[in-house]
């Protein structure tokens, strides 16, 4: 079984912006907590991904390439709005970081993810890394599709939100 061990953090500062970015559009055919089915277009490539229920920072993940035209047609079938973001990828102290700067209704939200070999694997924290939000369902992309960042209040955890 394919497992994803991923920790997620808010991002502060702009030092990460020097890394090149790729446009992402993704939607959800199913957002059940036990299994999420995602359609994604990353640059000019399409993907279909099935993810299992999270247990800590670990969950089952199966990702398959699909023709871009199929991914576009599947996005039209998705439940809720499409999430759009620019992903920047960079390496810090031997680990690859994916930094997502969200667009549209999620503009202003920037989240960094690191995939690890184990949940307790040590890693160096870049200067731009903020609070950890691993396991906080508000920051799941599937949640952002239904309850975008622009609707959050300061009580929801939105920095600077009204």
Image: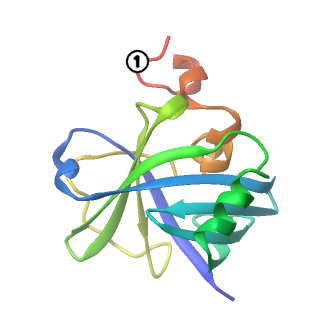
- For residue 74, above or below residue 133: below
Q: Residue at x 60, y 31 (%)?
A: 148
Examine the rendered structure and indicate whether residue 59 appears above or below residue 84.
Answer: below
Query: How many residues crowd around disc 1 within 10 Å: few (fewer than 14), some, or many (20 or more)?
Result: few
Q: Position of residue 97 (x, y in %)?
A: 33, 64
Q: Nearer the viewer, residue 56 or 50?
A: 50
Which element is circle 1 on?
loop
The residue lying toward the viewer, choosing from 24 and 119, is 24
Give residue 91's position: percent from left, percent from top: 24, 69
Q: Which residue is mark 1?
A: 160
Q: Which x, y percent locates residue 70?
A: 69, 68
Q: Does residue 120 lie above or below 73 as drawn?
A: below
Residue reaching furthest to the bottom: 1
Q: What colouring method underlies this structural image?
A: rainbow
Any part of residue 32 in sight: no
Q: Which image quarter: residue 126?
A: bottom left
- Residue at image x 40%, y 18%? 160
In the rendered image, the quadrant that contains the N terminus is: bottom right
Query: How many marks on residues?
Result: 1
Quadrant of the rendered image containing residue 155: top right
Q: Residue at x 55, y 61 (%)?
A: 41
Q: Is residue 48 visible?
A: yes
Find residue 87 and report its horizontal and vertical position in percent: 38, 55
In the displayed structure image, the side of residue 150 where residue 159 appears, left or right = left
The answer to whether residue 88 is left or right of residue 139 is left
Which residue of the protein is positioned furthest toward the top in this rendering?
162
Residue at 45% from the left image edge and 37% from the top image edge:
103
């Amino acid at each position: 079984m394919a497992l994803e061990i991923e920790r997620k953090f808010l991002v502060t500062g702009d030092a990460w912006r020097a890394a090149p970015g790729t446009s992402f559009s993704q939607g959800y055919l199913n957002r059940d907590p036990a299994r999420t089915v995602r359609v994604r277009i990353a640059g000019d490539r399409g993907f279909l991904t099935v993810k299992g229920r999270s247990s800590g920072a670990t969950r089952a993940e199966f990702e398959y390439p699909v023709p871009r035209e199929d991914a576009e047609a599947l996005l039209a079938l998705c439940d809720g709005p499409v999430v759009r973001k620019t992903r920047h990828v960079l390496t810090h102290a031997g680990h690859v970081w994916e930094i997502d700067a969200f667009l549209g209704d999620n503009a202003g939200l920037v989240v960094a993810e690191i995939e690890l070999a184990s949940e307790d694997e040590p890693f160096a924290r870049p200067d731009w890394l903020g609070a950890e939000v691993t396991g906080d369902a508000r920051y799941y992309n599937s949640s952002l599709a239904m309850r975008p960042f622009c609707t959050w209040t300061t009580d929801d955890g939105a920095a600077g939100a009204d």
